[in-house]
Image (cartoon, grey):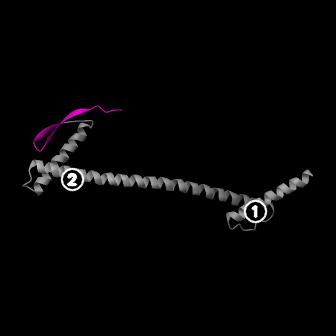
Amino acid sequence: MVKEKTRYKAVIADHTYTIIGQESKQHMDLVTKLVNEQLAEIKHISPQTNDEQASVLLAINAISDQLKKQEKVLNLEKEVAELKKRTIRLAELENRIKRIETIEEEARDVLKKNGQEDVEIHNHMEAQQILNENRKQQIQSKSTQDQ
C-alpha cells in the first residue's frame, strides 16, 4: 500500500519550509523539534556559526549517525543470520540425540526380553550393535522356520 504524500509546513531556525512526504504530522513535528534543538545546541557551542554553517554541521552529524546506525543494522542482520544457522544446527543435533536415545531404548528392550537387564549400554554404537545382532537372530530364526 502506497502512502499518500502530504505537505507539511516546518519552521526551522525562524524560516518556514514546505516539506512533502509520507510521514505523519506527529513524526514531522518531532523531526522539526529535534532539528531546531540541535541547531540551537550547535549555535550555543559555537556562537559565531551562522545558520547555513550550523545547518551543514547538523547535516554532517545526521549523516554520520545514519551511517553508524546502518552499520549496526548490518551487523545485527549478520548476527540474526548466524543465529538462524545455529538454531537449525541445534535442531539437527536434537533430532540426532532423539534418534540415538530411541536406539538405546530399543536396545534396552531387546536386552530385557533376553533376560540381560543388567547389561550396561555405554554408547549408541553398542546399542546399534545389539539391535543388529537381534535382527540377525530374527532373520536366522525365520529362515530356519521357513525350511
In this view, the residue in front, 39 or 67, is 67
- Left or right of residue 113: residue 68: left
Residue 113 image-quadrant placement: bottom right
Identify the main secondary structure in magenta: strand
Who comes first in sequence, dot 1 or dot 2? 2
User: At which x and y percent is residue 24?
Assistant: 26, 37
In the depicted structure, whether residue 109 falls above or below residue 53 = below
User: At which x and y percent is residue 50?
Assistant: 8, 50
For the magenta stretch, what is the residue range? 1-18
Q: Which mark is residue 31?
A: none
Other-residue count near label 1 (Cα within 10 Å), few / some / many at <14 / 14–19 / ≥20: many
Q: Is residue 104 magenta?
A: no
Q: Residue at x 34, y 54 (%)?
A: 72
Other-residue count near label 2 (Cα within 10 Å), few / some / many at <14 / 14–19 / ≥20: few
* Residue sticking out furthest to the top: 4
Frontmost of labels 1 and 2 is 2
The amino acid type, in three-letter code, at marker 2 is Asn
Name the residue carrying label 2: 61
In the depicted structure, whether residue 50 falls above or below residue 109 = above
Name the residue carrying label 1: 130
In this view, the residue in front, 61 or 135, is 61
Q: In what element is the residue under mark 2? A: helix
Q: Is residue 16 magenta?
A: yes
Q: Residue at x 19, y 43 (%)?
A: 32
User: At which x and y percent is residue 142?
Assistant: 87, 53
Q: Residue at x 63, y 56 (%)?
A: 98
In the depicted structure, whether residue 64 falls above or below residue 6 = below
User: At which x and y percent is residue 26?
Assistant: 24, 39
The amino acid type, in three-letter code, at marker 1 is Ile
Q: In what element is the residue under mark 1? A: helix
